[in-house]
Image (tube, helix red, strand yellow):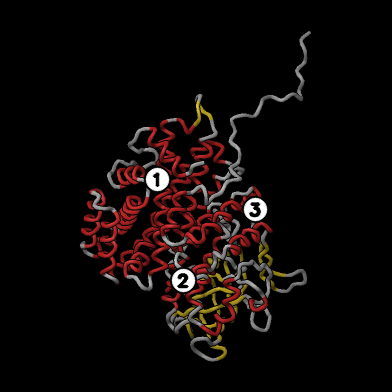
Amino acid sequence: MPAVPDSSAATHAVFNQVPDLSGYNLFETDPGLRAALERLGGGWHAGALGAFGARLGDPEVQAWAADANRLTPELHTHSRTGERIDAVSFHPSWHALLGLLRGQQLQALPFAQPRPGAWAARTAGYFLQAQVESGSLCPTTMTLASIPVLRKEPALFRDLEPRLYSTEHDARDLPWRDKTAVMIGMGMTEKQGGSDVRANTTVALPVRGEGRGAEYALTGHKWFFSAPMCDAHLVVARMGGPEGPLSCFFVPRFRDDGGKNPIEIQRLKDKLGNRSNASSEVEFRGATGILIGEEGRGIPTIIEMATNTRLDCVIGSAALLRAALVQSLHHARHRMAFGKLLADQPLMRNVLADLALESEAATQMMMALAHAFEHAEDDPLAAAWKRVVTPAAKFWICKRALEATGEAMEVWGGNGYVEEGPMARLYREAPVNSIWEGSGNVMCLDVLRALQRNPDDGARILHELARLSNGNAAVRAELASLQAMLREPAEQLEASGRRFAQGLVLTAQAALMIAHADSESAELFVASRLGRQHGRVFGTLDADTVTLQRVAKRTWPV
């Protein structure tokens, strides 16, 4: 009689599964970032970034990131006894992530420590945390962006400054004057307007005094009100009535008497990604606001804030490119298929090297922009980069992150398509930076408007790219093409806005790679992106497999 199988026996052994990537130093394993930091004067911060990079690679922090996106914010409109409280509760992991960000002073570093290389140092730190978790970046970005605006109001800023610069996170829901640290959000977008802030209808009526620093009552709505638990928001509203001039207001969560400001949270948005962060829809019902800046200058005031947030969109998307690359390399170096490691397969080497080039060029671009932000006030070239290249880079790099995260998911195969691994979250995060603070068309139009307002900017930038590229023929050809486009009639140039922005960023990235990257990587980037050897998908580089392996290894030498 045959033996009956033991139903409790294991059916198979688990093998050829890739271990989680953790326990590595995000900063020390990024040679391109470290070199750029040193070159741009931020080497004084390398020790702190090394410790930060090690902490971010810790399994505990990786778990915080996963928990914050799985256990999402909850809205509580009323207390148990019926009082209106409009509070959003977060999982402790969210506050732990904000504690990391504040500990590195990423919400204020260039202003709190105004020394050479401060923008490069802050950019590098933000880039590192953005590889681990994206939602916690939103209030950090907005707080940083609010500082130049708030500094122009000396009386208010005097009280805000220590709380804005604090290196500790204060999660308590209290009036901002009772807290040790504060966060500032933004309230611009309305149902009918989207990116067209001039279509806003929220109204501000005087309560105590008039003009700058006076108190107003705001009535209206905001369709996207990011991070509603921030201690205050900068809000655009119309002075005096529906046809009044648009102005900017500081609107706290609590009034000075300790009572809750009547900002009613209608609901939290059910978003595709960025789930750890609460985005809301709110109604202002006579909410107290303090006029910031000059009456009728709300749009320029907010644009100043948005310029800084757009830089963080570039950094955040560059970080997604880096995270997708590193996860792909880690997977390919551990996963066997058809008898050998994925990383040893010739076609996979092409894909990985191509992703590596994309990531390195994005890192070079974000650091160049950080340098421009630091020197924009006293250097016309830096100011031109800030005005023109920032929106162009936001347009292009954010879109490349969308493609690259999808490609990286494919490297993982079916394992990349499940929520237990890291790839699904990276993929869901990728679209937000293309949309937030102006979608692709808005960015391209802003590039053209900046060039129209400052006609010398184009010449300055193109001349600098020629210098950086050291006479490279492919770069020269692209520069000539860009110059020709700038001579086109205005309507035709606008219709070609995406092509111009794309060409400008690719040419700038090529020049930066030639000037600062390994010559082999630079040559491959120029040939593939400008020489038209590159196809419409990653993995079409024209190089031998040994070269492709070296490119990927240099980018993440683990």
Residue found at the far bottom of this picture: 209
Give me the disc on residue 64.
3
- Say which quarter of the image contains residue 1: top right
Residue under the image location 26 percent in, 69 percent down: 456
Q: Amino acid at mark 3?
A: Trp
Rendered view: 12 above or below 370 = above
Sequence order check, earlier mark of 3 and 1 = 3
| Residue annotated with mark 1 | 357
Residue under the image location 50 percent in, 78 percent down: 151
Q: Nearer the viewer, mark 3 or mark 1?
A: 1
| Residue annotated with mark 2 | 305
In the rendered picture of this protein, how many numbered marks are placed on residues? 3
Q: Nearer the viewer, residue 70 or 468?
A: 468
Answer left or right for 151 relative to 81: left
Measured as percent of width and height from the top left, residue 299 is found at 42, 75
Tag 1 secondary structure: helix
Q: Amino acid at mark 2?
A: Met
